[in-house]
Image (tube, grey):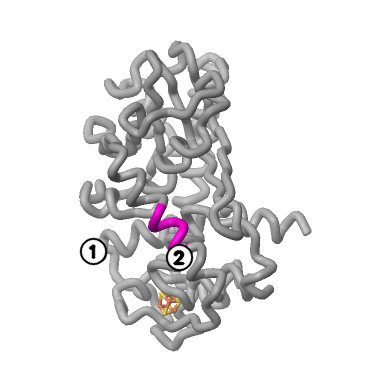
Amino acid sequence: MSVNQFTTLSQSSLQDYVDCARRFQLRYLDKLSYPAVESEPALENEKHQQEGEYFHRLIQQYLVGIPSRQISKMANSANLQRWWENFLNAKVLKGLRDLPGVYPEATLSAPLGRYRLMAKYDLIAVKDGKATVFDWKTYRRRPRNEWLSARMQTRVYRALLVHAGTYINNGTNFDPEQVEMIYWFADFPDEPAHFVYTSAQYKRDWDTLLKLAEEIHSTSSYPLTDDRQKCVFCPYRSYCERGIRAGNADQAEAEMEAEELFDVNFEQIGEIAF
Ligand code: SF4
C-alpha cells in the first residue's frame, strides 16, 4: 500500500510514526501485522493484552446496564477478577453509569489534512456541560504522568473531542476548558492520571496533528529510529536487525509501549475487512 492509498490516521498510527517511521511503514504500508518472531515475553504480553481487551468488554457491558453480578461471573481469571473488583470499588468511577451522558465505545472522526483522523474512546461521560474521556489501562506498572502527557493518545483524544464532539453536546462544540481526560489503571485503582485541557493546548495539538498528517503524506523515507530503547519490545525488531529477543521487564515504559503495539487499530481493521 502506498501512503497515498492510506486514508485514516489514529493515535496508534501517529504514535508509531513519531516513535519510528520504519515501524509505521512496516505496520501500515507493508501491512506486516503479525511479525515473524515471537519471543516468550512477547507471547506473555499478547495474553495480557487479550485479557485487557476482554476487561474492556466487561466494562462496556456494565456501562450499557448489565448487572454487575452477572458480569462478575465472566471475570474468569485472576487478573480479570482483580481488575473487576478494583473497577467496582474505584472512587473516581463511582456513579459513572448514572451520569446524564454516558457514551461507551464512542467513535469520533474528522478530516485531518488529506486524511481522516479517527478515535475510539473507552468512555466519554458528560455532566453539567463538561466532558470527561475515560481510558482503561491494564498496564503492569503505573506510568509517569509526563510520559502519558506526551503520548499521542492524550493529545488526539482531547483535541478530537473538541474538534468533532458536537453530536454528544447538543450540536455545540465543547470548549477545550470543558474537556478532561482520565486514565484509570486497573492495577492501580487509586492512582488515576488526570489531564485537563486548555485552548492553547488544543491549538498546539491540532497544529501538530496537521503537520504530522502533511509530513506522512509527503514523505517517502522511513528511517529506523535512533532511539534503540524503542526497539527493545518492538515486535518488528527482527526485520530491522535490532535483536531477536525482547528486553527485560525492567524497561517499564518500553514494555507499556509494547502492550499498545498489540492493539488492533482502525487501519488494521480496514485491512482485515478487505
Ligand atoms: S525494531 Fe526499532 S527500528 Fe525497527 S521498527 Fe521497531 S522501533 Fe523501528
| Residue linked to disc 2 | 16
Q: Quadrant of residue 193?
A: top left
Residue nearest the observer in this picture, 109 or 17: 109
Q: Give the percent coordinates (x, y) of residue 125.
A: 44, 23
Q: Quadrant of residue 61?
A: top right
Q: Residue furthest bottom?
A: 241
Q: Tag 1: Cα neighbours inside 10 Å, few (<14), some, or many (≥20)? A: few
Quadrant the C terminus occupies: bottom right
Q: Which mark is residue 250?
A: 1
User: Ligand 1 is in which quadrant of the figure?
Assistant: bottom left
Q: Earlier in the sequence, mark 2 or mark 1?
A: 2
* Residue drawn at 30 percent across, 45 percent down: 201
Q: Which callout, 2 or 1, points to the residue nearer the camera?
A: 2
The response on whether ligand 1 sits within 8 Å of label 1 is: no
The three-letter code of the residue at mark 2 reads Asp
Range covered by the magenta-colored residues: 207-212
Q: Are marks 2 and 1 in contact (CB under 8 Å)?
A: no
